[in-house]
Image (spheres, helix red, strand yellow):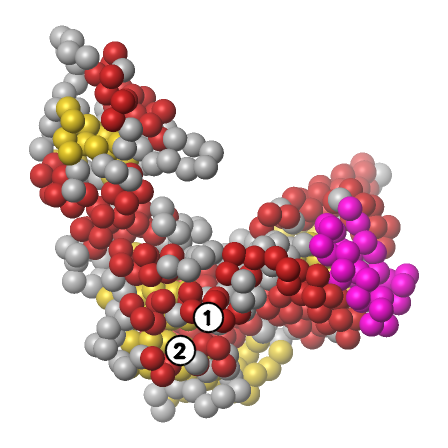
Amino acid sequence: MDTFTFDNIVKAINGTPLKGKGRDSYPSISIDSRTITRGELFIALKGKNFDGHDFVIQALKKGAGGAIISDKSLIENEFFQPRRGRSNSAIIAVQDTLDALHDIARYHRKRFDIHVVGITGSNGKSTSKEMSASVAGMKFNVLKNEGNLNNQIGLPLTILKMNENHTIAILEMGMSKQYEIKKLCEISEPDIGLITNIGKAHLEQLGSIENIRDAKGELVKAIGEGGTVILNSDDSLVMGLKDSFHGRVITFGINAPSDVTASDIRNRNLGYQFVLTMGGAETMVVLPYPGYHNIYNVLSAAAVGMSLGMDIEDIRRGIESFKPLPMRMEKYMIHGEITILNDAYNANPSSMEAAIKTLSIASFPGKKFLVAGDMLELGEASEDAHRYIGRLAASASIDYLITVGNESKFVFYEAIRSGMPRDKVYACDNFDEVVFILDDELEPGDCVMIKGSRGMKMEDLVERIIKLRSQKTESRIQNGEDDFLLTSVF
C-alpha cells in the first residue's frame, strides 16, 4: 500500500510543484541518495558540511519518484530539460527542506491513534528508552529510535517508519539548546513524557542549570492534561516541573517517596538485586550489569510500564530481557584476567560521578583504574566541573587515575591536591601515553574503567588496549603458553 500521496505531501509542506508529477504516491521518504530505493521521495537536506541538493540528480537516476528542494536553480540543470525518455519525476520547492521533513512526519504521526512516549534528560535517556521499549514490548508492538536518532532529523525519520502494526512509540528526545524539545514534541505529539534527570550537560550552549531545566521542561509543557508525566523524585530540579502540570504524574526514585521505587538494594559486584515496588505490588529484580544509576533507568522504565497499565511481572520480564547498549558500562574480559568497563559513549559531571561510584563500590581481586577523558561542552564551568571530578576520584576507592586531554588535566591537579598519591595519578596528552602506562601497570585481577565525552572517542582507547593485549597473548601462544580469551560479557 502506498504511504504518501503527491497531493497530501504538497499540502502538508505547503510546497510548490516545479516540474512534473511523476507518481501519484510514494512508498516512503528518504534523505540519503546512497540507500534510496525506487519510488521513494527524496528530501534534499542542508547541513554544515553537506548539501542534499548535490545528490538530487543521483537520487532520481537511481529511481527516486521525486524530490523536495529549496534551491530552485537546481532545475536549470541539463538533466531536467525536456528529452525523450526523461523521467517526469516531481520536483517540489519549499523554503526549508528540514521544515518539510518535520511537516511530513507531523502529518504521518496524525494518521495513527497510538500512545507516544517522549523521553529526555541529561543522562540515561538512551538506556531508559531501550529499557522502556523492552518493558513495553512484553505487551505492545513498539516503534523506537534506533541508535542515537533522537534529534530534529533522526526523530522525524523514526516517526516516518510508523505503521498500522505499531501500538506504541517510545521516542528519545535529544537537545543542545532551548526550543528543540518543543519542536520534537510538535512533530511527535507525545501523551506520556519522561524526564530522567537534569544535570550539567550542554552548559556551554545553555549557560545555566536553570536554562537546562527549562529546556528539558518543554516536554512537560507539551503533554496535555489528559496525558501522563513521569518524573524522577530524587532530582529536585525535575520535581520542580511538577507544579506546572495538571495531568497524571507518576514519580520514580530510591530516596524520596515515589510511586515506583527500589528497596533492599544489594550489590552483586558488577550488578544489583533489589525489590521493585509499584502500585501496591512488588517483585524481585536482578540486574546483571554495572552502574547504580541503572537502577534509576529500571525505575523509569517500570514507570512507563505503569503508565500503560502493565502488570508488574510483565514489567520485570521486560527489564530482565533488556540488553545494554554498546559503550554504556560494556564489560569485557581480557584473557579471563583483566576487566574493562567501556563507558565511552559520553560524559558530563553527573554521569562521570555515577561512573566513579560504580567503580568505587565494585569488588575486584586486583587494582581499580579510572581513565577519564575530557568532559566537553561545559563552557566557563569546565574547569570547576573537572576539578570536582578530581576530588571525587581522590575520595573514592580507586587505585589509579589516568587523565587524557586538556580539560582533564584539572582532574589530575585536583586529585593530587585532594590527597591522591602522586605516583598513582597520571596526566596524558594522548592515547599512546595511556596505553604505555596501562601496559606497564596492569596485572591479573585488575579493572579499568574508561569514560569521556563523545568527542574524545574513548572507545578507540579500548580497542588499543585490547589489540596490545592480543599481540602479547599471540606471542605467549607461540611460546606454548595459555590461549587468549576476549569476551564481551553482555
Amino acid type at circle 2 is Leu
Q: Is residue 300 left or right of residue 42?
A: right
- Circle on res. 106: none
- According to the picture, the residue beneath numbered tag 2 turns out to be 241
- Tell whether label 2 touches label 1 (CB within 8 Å): yes
| Label 2: which secondary element | loop
Q: CA distance from mark 1 to mark 2?
A: 8 Å
| Earlier residue among tags 1 and 2 | 1
Q: Position of residue 282 (x, y in %)?
A: 41, 87
- According to the picture, the residue beneath numbered tag 1 turns out to be 213
Q: Position of residue 444 (x, y in %)?
A: 80, 58
Which image quadrant is residue 248 in?
bottom left
Residue ID at (82%, 62%): 413
Residue 117 vs 464, above or below: the answer is: below
Residue ID at (38%, 65%): 119
Q: Position of residue 466 (x, y in %)?
A: 70, 46
Amino acid type at circle 1 is Arg
Q: Which residues are magenta?
A: 400-429
How crowded is the residue under tag 2: few (<14 C-alpha within 10 Å), some, or many (20+)? Answer: some
Quarter holding the N terminus? Answer: top left
Which image quadrant is residue 16 in?
top left
Quarter holding the C terminus? Answer: bottom right
Does the stretch in magenta take in 270?
Answer: no
